[in-house]
Image: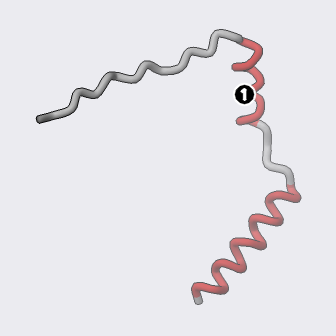
Amino acid sequence: MGTKVKPVQPTEIKDKKIIKEIIGQIRKPIPPSVEKKLKKNDELIMKFFK
């Protein structure tokens, strides 16, 4: 009656260059222009909920 579920193995990244690039992108700060845009969008959303 029950279904068997196979365990999923985590993906292994073997290339250290790719790992360093991904970590660099994650740690990169958000540009000020993007922050302004997000803040403007937040204000519009809050305006609609009032």
Indicate how the structure is coloured in the image: secondary structure
Which residue does the image show at 82% across and 57% down from the upper left?
Answer: 34
- Residue designated by label 1: 22
As drawn, is 33 to the left or to the right of 16? right
- Asked which quadrant contains residue 27, the reply is top right
As drawn, is 8 to the left or to the right of 49? left
User: Looking at the figure, which quarter contains the C terminus?
Assistant: bottom right
Which residue does the image show at 34% across and 22% down from the upper left?
Answer: 7
User: Looking at the figure, which quarter contains the N terminus?
Assistant: top left
Picture layout, residue 42 above or below residue 7: below
Q: Position of residue 3 (x, y in %)?
A: 21, 32
| Along the line of sight, the residue nearer the viewer: 42 or 4 | 4
Q: Amino acid at mark 1?
A: Ile
Packing grade of label 1 (10 A; few <14, some 14-19, many >=20) is: few
- Asked which quadrant contains residue 18, the reply is top right
Which residue does the image show at 58% across and 85% down from the upper left?
Answer: 49
Picture layout, residue 3 above or below residue 37: above
As drawn, is 10 to the left or to the right of 3? right
| Along the line of sight, the residue nearer the viewer: 43 or 13 | 13
Q: Position of residue 33 (x, y in %)?
A: 88, 59
Residue, far front: 1
